[in-house]
Image (cartoon, rainbow, N blue to C red):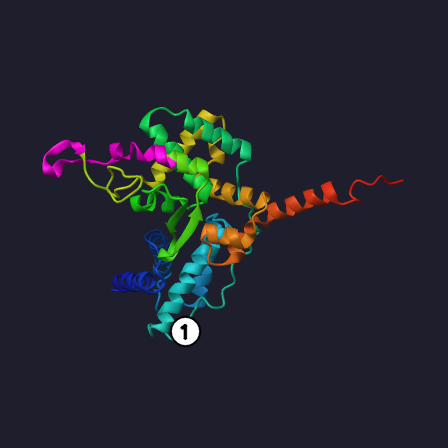
Amino acid sequence: MAKALTSSLISAFLEMMAAERGASVHTLDAYRRDLEDYASSLTAGKADPVSASDADVRRYMAELGSAGLAPRTQARRLSALRQFHKFLYSDGYRDDDPSSNIDSPQQGQTLPKFLSIEEIDRLIIAATNHPGIKGKRLLAMVELMYATGMRVSELVELPFAAAARDPQMLIVRGKGSKERLVPLSDPARDALRDYLEVRDAFIPSDKSNGHADRPGQSSYLFPSRGKTGHLTRQMFLKMIKDLAIEAGVPPSKVSPHVLRHSFASHLLANGADLRSLQKMLGHSDISTTQIYTHVLESRLRGLVQEHHPLATRAIG
């Protein structure tokens, strides 16, 4: 009975997150995994979400530390169960919140990893030299990723309508179904235009009408024969890892999120301001964007060293 109740409470919480806060499918999946792991720990301690005490929550957090999870991951798990317990309290399932007095794990600030402009150039050159229609798709995706700083989920789920008319601005639907406008560079527009000429080749055949050799329909910019109907994040990750090898860039350094970080870091290094970057990245809070200020600090030090009259004055 306790297991069924726990499952029901988690489902009710996820429904609330989807309906009231517009949480994406990926966010809901992450919450479900974290809360099911928490529930398993409670069950082992002969408790459940309704009866759990702050000692149960502390024990769970200690288990995460003992398992070697990074402080950032522990903090994310704690955030999930805090929201869960706030939901249980506000909806009357219990009259207190056992997570309210639990401190977040101490964590140092991790600077975002990004590629140099020269490494990005090598990736783009390798994609340009990639043969056939898959090469055109690969180049379009890499150019779009680097030109806009989109999340990989936003890239693979882009609707065809967003790019069907050679746009100068791209409408991107981000977290919480919030839309934002992101400008496209000329190289990205050129790569996108070339890809659109061959896009139909990636649309599954319309077998339902007896035409096994005729493309069907797809609402996605990057269609696929898979069950999602679009190219998956995992497939794009594999594509750019292979591309990195071809470009002579260590594949361990390359991921969709690294391309996003590279976009942000290179913009700031070349004079963009944090507010503009916040809008382009789709961050709801500028504090998230401020992880890139290390680039600003480096640029400011360079400006002082290069232009301040005292920086190069001989001493002695």
Taking depth in this image into account, of 185 and 89 the one nearest to the observer is 185
Residue at the image position 33 percent from the left and 72 percent from the top: 93
Say if 13 sits above or below 196 in the image.
below
Which SS class for mark 1? loop
The residue furthest left is: 210
Say if 234 sits above or below 35 in the image.
above
Quadrant housing the C terminus: top right
Q: Amino acid at mark 1?
A: Asp
Q: Which quarter of the figure has residue 163?
A: top left
Say if 116 sits above or below 9 in the image.
above
Magenta stretch: give its range: 192-214
Q: Which quarter of the figure has residue 63?
A: bottom left
Q: Position of residue 258 (x, y in %)?
A: 48, 40
Q: Position of residue 290 (x, y in %)?
A: 56, 53
* Residue on which the image places disc 1: 96
Quadrant housing the N terminus: bottom left
Asked if residue 60 shows in the view, the reply is: no
Q: Position of residue 206 (x, y in %)?
A: 16, 37
Q: Position of residue 96 (x, y in %)?
A: 41, 73
Q: Is residue 52 magenta?
A: no
Q: Is residue 197 magenta?
A: yes
